Image (tube, helix red, strand yellow):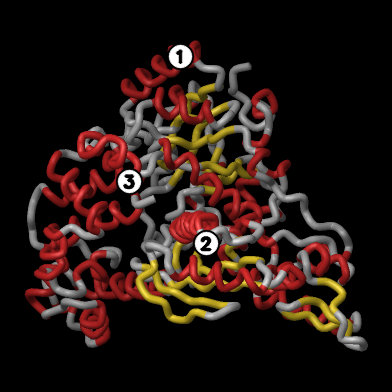
């Protein structure tokens, strides 16, 4: 799908135009980008089927933007945007991604200090030139330093939400090309490996593994290096090829024979620490383990290698799911046959955190419910923002009551249970954003912090624990407040938060938005020891966001969660054990 590429193209153009102080176009381009990004259908197929008229049916896409999309789909570029990039300072787009640097501040830094690149910005911070500028000061300089460090750390790796769809698209394209050229291979054994298969929140390069006999390996390599998105072929061989895609990602493909496929899959999935421990066990048991197989040290004969299950079984271990392979106790548990039975996609019965166009969502309640219903969910929580979140079109009480009436009407039409909820702001004193008489009427109250992120640890801890003591609060949303690559988690004592949540029987959210993944796997792993329950929610703002639940599921599995730990695996009647106000 070209949706992601085209959306990124418009985001980039908007950033440059905003820097140039063009007033209305950046907003129009960003709106179009958001709509394209959240389309449930391949924009290339829409154009092929309906032409430019079909493109203009997409909200936010007018004639001019449709022309740009068509030009990109036909030529691979937009001439107007190419000229725009040529006129912009080379580091503009990169600097736009630094938190706290909007277009106006960038312009001021450029005019006053000649800052045009990330390197310029770092030099100005290190020599304390920024703190001397009007409207900046010492605190601004400190915040920019933290933002630069966060940016550089996050950009060493790719977010899971970008890497996983990219890998899937690439594998799909590779399979299609192999079919076209009649490669005789098992298509089910073309798979991504590495940290992506372990569903880590950020990914380095993407690694792909395929199984094939020697005579078919070169055919796969020919198909791989000839894929349309390949910009550069770095290496091409019989067993390994490396390419760089047009958008800059490095991809490695390895092809191994059937007798080594399981060993290679285990080896290249990692993690490094897990593999070291596994090799040590192999040595103690009289074997040698490598990416080619498990061999007897004495006879040098291969004793396992076709499947991962064979490798683990021969070493006296239960099969360890990829998400657990971090050397956090999984090998000892596998030796005792006491690994958790991890929660699975098929266990999920609903989504307890979605937004509609009543606040900052892009779709109507009806559209969101239709999609949730089509996914086979039993229930869904409509949780638009509360009144203090004006930037997110938070709802005043009258508007909230109007939403209740619409939900009542829709509930008569749909099989799925629709919960009247709200994502209620946790105010700075720990109180909730609606009065008690409104909160008690809600089926579900999702509490969240959206402001005051720089508060000291004690103040933030007191704020959140006070909210957890409120009997009306049901779920603590995105508990650490982080945004991957943009904002680190706020300073808070998580042990105290977990203690308060456990004492008051509150549910912790695992937010599936790729930009959040909050709680992350490490905090989930810690929180489970407190006996807490969790929900995996999407925080959806469009129908396409509902599919992002798989990212939260991945973090839950990495955190060792089982079905019983996750409340939205429960049938609707059982939810009443957690949320006492649900209507039967």
Q: Is residue 564 left or right of residue 572?
A: right
Q: Which residue is mark 3?
A: 44
Which one is nearer the viewer's eye here, 218 or 332?
218
Res 459 seen here: no
Measured in 3D between alpha carbons, the distance from the residue under mark 3 to the one under mark 1, in whole angstroms, is 38 Å
Q: Which of marks 2 and 1 precedes in the sequence?
A: 2
Q: Position of residue 363 (x, y in %)?
A: 35, 31
- Residue at screen point 62% across, 63% down: 198
Q: In the rendered view, tell whether residue 367 sits above or below residue 25.
A: above
Q: Residues within 10 Å of mark 2 (few under 14, many from 20)?
A: many
- Residue at screen point 34% across, 67% down: 246
SS for callout 1: helix
Q: Position of residue 98 (x, y in %)?
A: 29, 67
SS for callout 2: loop
Res 89 seen here: yes
Measured in 3D between alpha carbons, the distance from the residue under mark 3 to the one under mark 2, in whole angstroms, is 29 Å
Q: Which residue is mark 1?
A: 408
Which one is nearer the viewer's eye here, 363 or 536?
363
Q: Which residue is mark 2?
A: 201
Question: Based on the displayed image, in which of its 4 quarters is residue 298 positioned?
Answer: bottom right
Q: Nearer the viewer, mark 3 or mark 1?
A: 3
């Amino acid at each position: 799908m070209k949706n992601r590429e085209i959306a990124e193209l418009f985001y980039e153009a908007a950033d440059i135009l905003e820097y140039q102080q063009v007033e209305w176009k950046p907003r129009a381009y960003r709106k179009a980008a958001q709509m394209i990004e959240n389309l449930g259908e391949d924009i290339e197929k829409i154009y092929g089927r309906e032409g430019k008229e079909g493109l203009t049916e997409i909200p936010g896409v007018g004639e001019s933007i449709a022309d740009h999309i068509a030009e990109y789909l036909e030529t691979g570029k937009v001439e107007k945007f190419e000229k725009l990039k040529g006129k912009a300072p080379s580091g503009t787009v990169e600097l736009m991604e630094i938190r706290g640097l909007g277009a106006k501040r960038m312009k001021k830094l450029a005019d006053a200090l000649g800052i045009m690149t990330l390197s310029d910005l770092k030099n100005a911070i290190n020599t304390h030139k920024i703190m001397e500028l009007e409207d900046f000061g010492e605190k601004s300089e400190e915040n920019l330093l933290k933002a630069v460090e966060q940016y550089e750390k996050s950009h060493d790796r790719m977010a899971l939400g970008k890497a996983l769809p990219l890998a899937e698209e690439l594998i799909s394209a590779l399979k299609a090309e192999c079919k076209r050229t009649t490669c005789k291979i098992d298509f089910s054994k073309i798979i991504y490996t590495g940290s992506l298969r372990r569903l880590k929140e950020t990914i380095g390069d993407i690694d792909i593994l395929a199984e094939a006999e020697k005579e078919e390996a070169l055919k796969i390599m020919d198909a791989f290096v000839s894929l349309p998105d390949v910009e550069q072929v770095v290496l091409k061989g019989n067993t390994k090829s490396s390419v760089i895609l047009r958008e800059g990602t490095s991809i490695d493909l390895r092809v191994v024979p059937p007798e080594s496929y399981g060993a290679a899959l285990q080896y290249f999935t990692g993690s490094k620490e897990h593999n070291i421990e596994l090799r040590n066990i192999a040595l103690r048991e009289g074997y040698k383990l490598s990416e080619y197989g498990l061999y007897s040290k004495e006879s040098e004969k291969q004793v396992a290698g076709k499947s991962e299950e064979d490798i683990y079984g021969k070493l006296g271990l239960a099969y360890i799911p990829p998400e657990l392979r971090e050397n956090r106790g999984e090998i000892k548990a596998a030796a005792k046959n006491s690994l958790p039975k991890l929660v699975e996609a098929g266990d999920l019965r609903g989504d307890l955190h979605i937004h509609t166009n009543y606040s900052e969502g892009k779709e109507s309640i009806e559209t969101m419910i239709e999609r949730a219903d089509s996914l086979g969910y039993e229930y869904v929580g409509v949780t638009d923002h509360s009144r203090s979140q004006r930037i997110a079109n938070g709802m005043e009480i009258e508007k909230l009551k109007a939403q209740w009436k619409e939900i009542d009407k829709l509930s008569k039409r749909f099989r799925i249970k629709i919960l009247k909820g709200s994502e209620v702001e946790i105010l700075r004193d720990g109180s909730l954003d609606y009065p008690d008489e409104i909160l008690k009427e809600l089926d579900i109250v999702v509490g969240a912090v959206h402001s005051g992120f720089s508060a000291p640890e004690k103040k933030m801890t007191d704020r959140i624990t006070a909210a957890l003591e409120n009997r009306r609060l049901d779920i603590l949303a995105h508990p650490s407040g982080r945004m991957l690559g943009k904002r680190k988690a706020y300073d808070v004592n998580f042990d105290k938060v977990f203690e308060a949540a456990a004492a008051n029987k509150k549910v912790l959210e695992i937010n599936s938005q790729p930009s959040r993944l909050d709680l992350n796997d490490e905090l989930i792993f810690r929180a489970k020891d407190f006996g807490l329950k969790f929900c995996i929610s999407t925080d959806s703002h469009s129908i396409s966001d509902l599919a992002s639940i798989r990212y939260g599921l991945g973090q839950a599995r990495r955190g060792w969660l089982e079905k019983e730990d996750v409340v939205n695996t429960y049938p609707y009647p059982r939810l009443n054990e957690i949320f006492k106000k649900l209507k039967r």
